[in-house]
Amino acid sequence: MSETVITVENLSKQYRIGVRERYGCLRESIVKGITAPFQRLRRLGQKPPPEETIWALKDVSFEVQKGEVLGIIGRNGAGKTTLLKVLSRITEPTEGEVRIRGRVASLLEVGTGFHPELTGRENIFLNGAVLGMTRKEIQRKFDEIVAFAEVEKFIDTPVKRYSSGMYVRLAFAVAAHLEPEVLLVDEVLAVGDAEFQKKCLGKMGDVAREGRTVLFVSHNMAATVKLCARGLLLSSGRLVKEGSSRETVDFYLGTSGGRTALNVALDSPERSRGRLVYITGVCGLDGSHNETTGITTGSRCAVAFGFATEAFPLQVRFAFGLIDSMGEYCLHCGSFTLGHNLCLHSSRGWIVCRFARLPLMPGTYSVNFMLQDAGGGVLDYLKNAARLTVRDGDYYGSGRLPGAGMGNVLADYDYSVIPDSLLPRERCAKKEEREWEWLPRQHISNEK
Amino acid sequence: MPTDVDVSESIIESQPLGQEPAAPSVSLLPEMVIRPRRGWFAIDLNELWQYRELLYFLTWRDIKVRYKQTVLGALWAIIQPALNMVVFTLFFGRLAKMPSDGVPYPIFVYAGLLPWTYFSHAVTQAGNSVIGDKNLITKVYFPRLLIPMGAATAGLMDFVIAMTVLGGLMVYYGFVPSVGLMLFPVLALVTYILAIGVGLWFAALNVKYRDVTYAIPFVVQLWMFCTPVIYPTTLLKKYAWVMALNPMGGLIEAYRACTLGHMPIAWASLSISCVIILAVFMGGLIYFRRMETHFADVI
């Protein structure tokens, strides 16, 4: 039975921007104070100046249950850090209300309060106190913290002598041993090397498993999906999507690059495009060359790219790549790799890449493409041109596929068990026994 | 489609998180409501008490950092007022022949310098403290009052160390401590309150108007000349009552009177000073609290 730990209602935060943001000078304020009545008179007949404010958050409402791990994602400037700042009481909301039950600890930065002149030991106490731990608590956990940070030998050296890695490890170690009911974490995992990040993720996982409520802001979509059960997507201060973390991440990635599925953004600024030849669209084709919005794993299908050209016939090289929602480049299909160029015969047409059996796992992929002339000069290039959906299908004829997160590309393989006498190969007398069949067994053919 | 077994190590189990731990039920925990604050509001003493350990740590940090990597360390707490005393004795005591109410000039001036040095340091440190801890303000929550308070409290240690010189001087000149010495801790407390009060005003103003950083040293310097540190209040003759308007004026004379016992304590001017000090303190507290909400946005 879950209880609501955080309730956010119509939260809004307004900031002033522009000229007024400079450090004020007393002199200027006095001068403004004196001349204000005259300014007002002068402005009576004119229009008021444009608003110099922005809404960093506008009407954000959501609830968080006890023990939930909530991921907050969005572009830079969406309001994620502002939301955490309001929840941590660092800054005040302009409108709206937040109710939180329990002790809140926020990790907006690693090493808050660290003073370079103090030793590691002293900084552990200082940082712990700043983050809200009592002295007894810190003393109790002191050894654990030092062990987690792996800085036993340097604990009595001033922190200004630490390498940046040690600094960050120590800072995170202190923060990781907080025991609040609600933990707010803001992209602190973005620092440190891969080893450290893995450790941090692990620790975050432990914290979540202990039943604490965690709000996790990150740009690392893989970490967000792994750690968080639910997700919140902010865009320009508004709550745009709320749902499971995977749903939210897919939605975010869907709108951050290409436009609607399978439509190329012709006027996108990221596109290097020539006037002469360009790609007009992308779509999937099924086994019968019918347009389909989704192609199926293991099926006979194709990906087709429409083109328009003013000069024809024209020799071109074409390649496209498929990137999964975690940003991994899964598959690259290029005509150059095959060893030949393509010839565009008419002013309009389609470049079709066919697969006998599509070796991709089900999911949504984003498409990059590159069109080059025969010499390699770029004619049209676009990243995130479209989203391609690959539907669940039967690649192996067994009705089974690997689980989610276990690779994106399917290979043809088979399993067999061989008697020991066949190895090592020198002992084999018969030639036939030495070379067993390498070809995969024939699958149930999809040929019609 | 049925899926294969995951042979890789996963960081997180895919089981639903949030087993019920042995923590108290959520409804028993205190609820915190965050909403836009309007108008004047009272100081949350409860919260300040909760964060008392942080005050200790901030003070401890300020003290430690001041003398790290120095050779002379805590001696600096003595050197400054002592050297001041020597120079003032030479120029004001000997050459300018400043009257000193019947006591030897060195001890006369030191009795005034001791609390003044604390006050000027505390106010300067407190005034710059909020700006100096900018990264704390923007990244962590705790009652911001603790920052200038910590700065003012850190100065107390130097105050205590410098008292040893006063003790030495009293022995040298043969001053026997009188009953009036019991007032000393009370005066110290009042000075502490004034230092915090003025420090709060400066700290809050400094966040918005950076001029204050440059203004503080020169305001403090002028203030010293307006306070009877180098000269006695009696120098003003019939305008001596004006000195009561300077809160430090009444205090410094009271310090001198209670340690040296050369004059009875001027209760009238001391009371007026205390009233003004209280007003400055309350005003500083309210102004600081009012501006506190915008610190993180403006700093």
Image: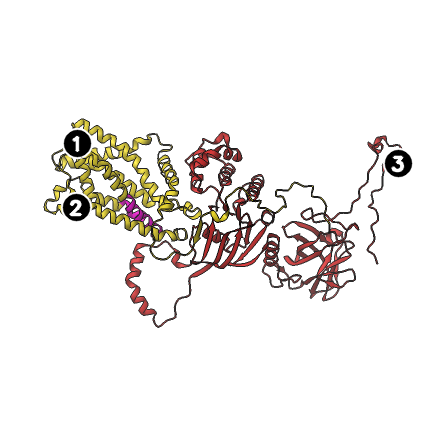
- In this view of the protein, can residue B88 be seen by the observer? no
Residue B44 visible? yes
Residue receiving disc 1? B178
Could you tell me which secondary element the residue under label 1 belongs to? loop
Q: Colour of chain A?
A: red
Query: Hey, what amino acid is under mark 2?
Result: Met
- For disc 2, the marked residue is B243
Q: Chain of mark 2?
A: B
* Residue A183, horizontal then vertical, whole percent: 50, 46
Instruction: Look at label 3 and name its amino acid.
Output: Lys
Q: Which residues are magenta?
A: B195-217
Label 1 or label 2, whichever comes before in sequence order: 1
- Residue B164 figure quarter: top left
2 vs 3, front mark: 2
Give whichever of B229, A317 is nearer the camera.
B229
| Mark 3, residue position | A431
